[in-house]
């Protein structure tokens, strides 16, 4: 996830910018850069990889008088993580940093290229600085040029721009991506995309609202609203607790990560969807030449997302797909044939068992692909090809947004393969792509839903166990719901295919057995419903999750009416995550660091 910092003042701006970027490191990034204007002279540095690389590059650079500076950590979306694609981006005499996405960048870029502008990067961001310099040629002032530029951008952004002609000014604009400005008694101004870089430097901060834009100088903070009317800043005292600032006001990282899912799924989709085609620039389509089977291998939550993929790949792409738990696969002398594409799935890219299976597949000469959240991780380095899930850093041990982005990638990949193999009609691919675009909205946590689950959670703190049940892709979701609950509540929970109840598990049914039933309207509703009725008849306590009211349930958590079962999947996923969270909170457990568990399991 990208991060922005900015500074205006007399202190050592290099140290302040690098220090600010360090505070944003936890969000994840793959390159970083700064630009400083001092004594009418710009200095700019960029480096790929960790901030130490940027620190090394700037070690002889001194800032010891008044200066203005901007900095950025970049999580690659448009274009690979290279120095050229790292921010700040340069025009002729101006630099820009930006978070978010400029949706009309291709259009603007085409016009600028036709007018003779040369682009150095593959990013959407670079259009901002060139558009600004184009406008500057005819504008009355740099601010007018900036204002015009902002009005020409479509999409979501938080951006800072500095230009040589205005040595004491930083221009800013915010629309859809977070940004704040901080002040102090020393007349300094600080910008950042979240609180943490400002802690210890600023006494008061103003959080920009969507549509806000303006500029700062040593003596002025000028903010204009979306209609261009000047407004007063609304200052708030800044918290002094860095950890709580990193949580953006949420009680736990897990909660923050649940709420972040809408944004990170949007990031996962960026640049990968056309009207009737899914694009994975990172994949060479020849990877699938000669492939008759896909074998998925993973652990824990990643295994559950992969299990979802087995349904989607066979249904959409008509490719034979199988799945293995990595810790089993590695010791069972599996038969590996070269017409199999071996796919490992891992949030961290470091899980020992999964990594070992990847090594086995490579040794057997299979083509390999990794679906991963961490660039440069061991699996990413080893596999032949890689799709990054772009969930940003996940801190809660109980995985949430990593799962959500993995399923999103698998859904996209099933359509990509369906296109490649002509296994689905174009119209069906286009229909599902339109649905994919709705996922960010469907995972938004609604206050009403969260409140309801908070209240309901008090009824689920005891009992002798939980069954989570679902059919088809809702079976892996049931497994994932049960795993989430076990991990952070320490209550016994199992996931089952709904149809399996009568083959044994139903023997446990009594009022102290809690059944969390997933009842999607658009997939096998009647079948799943009768399985739940069987449990209800045996007096199991039922909590049904559905868009259709269900009178045999003791409790009912409604989801929004959806157009398709995959959107119901994402809505229910959020309900299950919030339910586990609230049960764990009531039990007084450490939500982010549950007992006996580690975030990255690098031992077998
Ligand atoms: O990093 P990975 O996705 O390879 O990790 C696999 C499992 O260890 C992980 O999903 C684990 O099950 C989580 N704690 C689930 O919340």
Image (tube, rainbow, N blue to C red):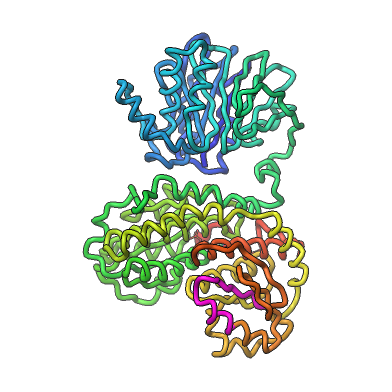
Which residue sits at x=46%, y=33%? 53
Q: In this view, does 459 lie above or below 404?
A: below
Residue 71 or 285: which is nearer the viewer? Answer: 285
Which residue sits at x=59%, y=12%? 65
x then y, percent, for residue 327: 45, 70
Q: How many marks?
A: 0
x then y, percent, for residue 98: 50, 32
Residue 217 or 67: which is nearer the viewer? Answer: 217
Q: In this view, does 230 lie above or below 413?
A: above
In this image, 387 relative to 524: left or right?
left
Visible residue check, residue 524: yes
Q: In which quarter of the image is residue 513?
A: bottom right
Q: In this view, does 223 lie above or below 267?
A: above
In this image, 129 relative to 465: left or right?
left
Which residue sits at x=51%, y=63%? 563
x then y, percent, for residue 585: 74, 61
Residue 369 sits inside the magenta stretch: no
Q: Quadrant of residue 289?
A: bottom left
Q: In this view, does 490 lie above or below 78?
A: below
Range drawn in magenta = 515-531
Residue 518 sits inside the magenta stretch: yes
x then y, percent, for residue 334: 34, 75
In this image, 201 relative to 328: left or right?
right
Visible residue check, residue 16: no
Query: What residue occupies the far left of the structure in this picture?
Result: 290
Q: Quadrant of residue 592?
A: bottom right
């Amino acid at each position: 996830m990208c991060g922005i910092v900015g500074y205006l003042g007399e202190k050592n701006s290099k140290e302040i910018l690098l220090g600010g970027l360090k505070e944003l490191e936890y969000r994840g990034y793959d390159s970083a850069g700064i630009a400083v204007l001092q004594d009418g002279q710009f200095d700019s540095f960029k480096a790929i990889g960790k901030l130490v690389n940027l620190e090394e590059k700037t070690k002889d650079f001194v800032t010891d008088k008044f200066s203005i500076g901007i900095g950025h950590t970049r999580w690659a979306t448009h274009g690979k993580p290279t120095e050229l694609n790292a921010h700040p981006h340069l025009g002729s005499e101006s630099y820009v940093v930006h978070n978010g996405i400029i949706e009309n960048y291709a259009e603007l870029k085409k016009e600028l290229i036709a007018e003779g502008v040369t682009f150095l990067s593959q990013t959407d961001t670079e259009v901002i600085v060139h558009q600004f310099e184009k406008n500057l040629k005819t504008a009355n002032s740099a601010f007018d040029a900036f204002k015009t530029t902002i009005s020409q951008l479509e999409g979501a952004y938080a951006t800072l721009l500095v230009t040589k002609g205005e040595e004491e000014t930083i221009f800013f604009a915010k629309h859809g991506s977070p940004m704040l400005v901080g002040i102090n008694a020393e007349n300094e101004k600080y910008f950042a995309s979240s609180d943490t870089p400002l802690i210890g430097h600023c006494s008061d901060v103003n959080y920009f609202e969507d549509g806000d834009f303006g500029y700062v100088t040593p003596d002025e903070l000028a903010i204009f609203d979306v209609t261009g009317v000047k407004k007063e800043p609304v200052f708030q005292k800044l918290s002094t607790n860095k950890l709580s600032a990193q949580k953006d006001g949420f009680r736990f990282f897990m909660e923050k990560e649940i709420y972040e899912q809408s944004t990170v799924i949007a990031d996962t989709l960026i640049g990968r969807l056309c009207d009737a085609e899914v694009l994975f620039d990172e994949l060479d389509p020849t990877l699938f030449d000669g492939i008759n089977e896909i074998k998925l291998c993973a652990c824990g939550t990643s295994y559950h997302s992969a299990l979802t993929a087995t349904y989607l790949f066979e249904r959409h792409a008509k490719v034979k797909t199988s799945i293995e738990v990595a810790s089993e696969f590695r010791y069972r002398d599996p038969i590996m044939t070269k017409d199999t594409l071996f796919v490992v799935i891992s949030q961290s890219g470091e899980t020992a068992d999964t990594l070992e299976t990847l090594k086995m597949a490579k040794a057997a000469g299979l083509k390999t692909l990794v679906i991963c959240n961490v660039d440069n991780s061991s699996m990413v380095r080893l596999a032949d090809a890689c799709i990054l899930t772009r969930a940003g850093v996940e801190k809660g041990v109980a995985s949430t947004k990593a799962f959500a982005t993995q399923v999103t990638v698998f859904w996209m990949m099933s359509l990509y393969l369906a296109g490649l193999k002509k296994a689905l009609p174009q119209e069906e691919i286009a229909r599902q792509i339109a649905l994919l675009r709705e996922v960010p909205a469907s995972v938004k946590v609604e206050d009403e839903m969260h409140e309801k689950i908070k209240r309901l959670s008090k009824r689920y703190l005891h009992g002798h166990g939980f069954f989570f049940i679902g059919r088809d892709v809702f079976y892996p979701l049931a497994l994932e719901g049960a795993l989430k609950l076990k991990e952070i509540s320490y209550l016994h929970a199992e996931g089952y295919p709904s149809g399996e109840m009568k083959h044994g598990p139903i023997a446990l049914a009594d009022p102290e057995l809690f059944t969390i039933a997933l009842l999607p309207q658009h997939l096998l509703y009647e079948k799943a419903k009768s399985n739940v009725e069987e449990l209800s008849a045996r007096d199991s306590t039922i909590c049904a999750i559905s868009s259709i009211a269900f009178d045999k349930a003791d409790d009912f958590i409604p989801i929004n009416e959806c157009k398709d079962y995959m959107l119901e999947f994402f809505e229910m996923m959020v309900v299950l995550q919030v339910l586990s969270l609230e049960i764990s909170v009531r039990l007084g457990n450490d939500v982010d660091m549950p007992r006996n568990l580690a975030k990255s399991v690098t031992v077998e």
